Image (cartoon, helix red, strand yellow):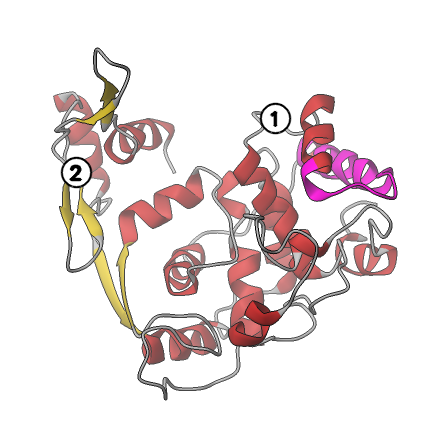
Amino acid sequence: MDKGLFKALKKVYYKKSYRKDENGYQQRIDNGDVFDIETGTYTYSYQGLSSAEVALIEQSGYSVNDRVKLSHDDAVSGYKAILAQPNLSLENLLAAYLCGFSSFPRGRQPILSYLFAKALPEHVMTIDGEICPVCSIKRVNWIAKGQKIYSCYTGSVWNEHWAHNLVELQEFCTLSPCKPSAEDVAIFSALIEAIRQAPLDETLGKLEQRVKKAKIIPQFNQYSFRGQLMVLAELGVMPNPYVAPLYEAFTPFEEICKIKYPGSIRSDIILPLAGWRGENPIDEQRLKQLFGGFTC
């Protein structure tokens, strides 16, 4: 994505929406964005942008307020169909993930979306509820496509909201494969070594603090970094004893919800990453199998 377009879209999607009043309370301000209760999405305004920035966005053809409606069954069939795309080779996706450490933040999410697509069993919505007990995808999904794709270019990555991730994977298929830079590989290698050196009783939270203090990750953001670790967990590189990673098998959503592990009641971290501990930091065989062609 063009740097000028990236900056202009940031002003569209991340504009200020609250300010403190004289008593220190946050008050909602009118920034031109309109929330649609029916779809749960926003129509974003160009408020605060210069005429040149608006022209840049419009000339680029980027669909700022494009919304997509996907049923559960459409999302599942879409995931299975997209596996035929030539860009979605494991090698390309792992390379993109490595690029995500510095040169191409957009590369972080696709490997997770692909692992889900690969593992997801073909099925249809058979219950009366709104959330599928098999895959957690809602019966009806409204997706702010423009905002979702932009968030991936900022480096956002996570293993939830799977209907939304289908949209990003479709966009990724239109991009040319990327090659990790020396800096990407160096950062990844430093991270792997830091994980290897984890004390036996280290939790994910303590690992995050240690990596941040060591300044291994440029422009460290806790949630983006946690997403990068989630990729390693779903690949089985950061193992856990509670649930199989997507790389190995698919575990139904309703079964995952029943699994109890230390901190499961109060933690905002989910499996499989939540089950990682320093006593078993890295599956060296899996690391070599997947990333041996790049490093480590």
Q: Residues within 10 Å of mark 1 (few under 14, many from 20)?
A: few
Q: Position of residue 120 (x, y in %)?
A: 53, 76
Whether residue 201 appears in magenta in the rendering, the answer is: yes
Say whether residue 188 is left or right of residue 9. right
137 with respect to 141 (left or right): right
Q: Is residue 74 above or below residue 259?
A: below
Quick check: 189 above or below 209? below
Q: For mark 1, what is the residue?
A: 218
The quarter of the rendered structure image containing the C terminus is top right
Residue 58: mark = 2
**Please, what is the three-letter code of the amino acid marked with disc 2?**
Glu
Residue at 40% from the left image edge and 70% from the top image edge: 137
Q: Is residue 179 visible?
A: no
Q: Position of residue 208 (x, y in %)?
A: 67, 35
Which portion, as a residue range, is magenta?
183-205
Q: Give the structural element (helix, strand or loop) at label 1.
A: loop
Of label 1 and label 2, which has the lower sequence position?
2
Please state, as top left, top right, bottom left or bottom right, where the N terminus lies in the image. top left
**Residue at the image position 28 percent from the left and 48 percent from the top:** 146
* Amino acid at dot 1: Pro
Q: Is residue 93 magenta?
A: no
Camera sees residue 292 = yes
| Residue 137 drawn above or below residue 103 | below
Which of these two is toward me, 222 or 216? 222
Which of the pair 295/27 is nearer the observer?
A: 27
Percent position of residue 42, x then y: 19, 46
Residue nearer the viewer, 153 or 33: 33
- Main secondary structure type of the part rendered in magenta: helix
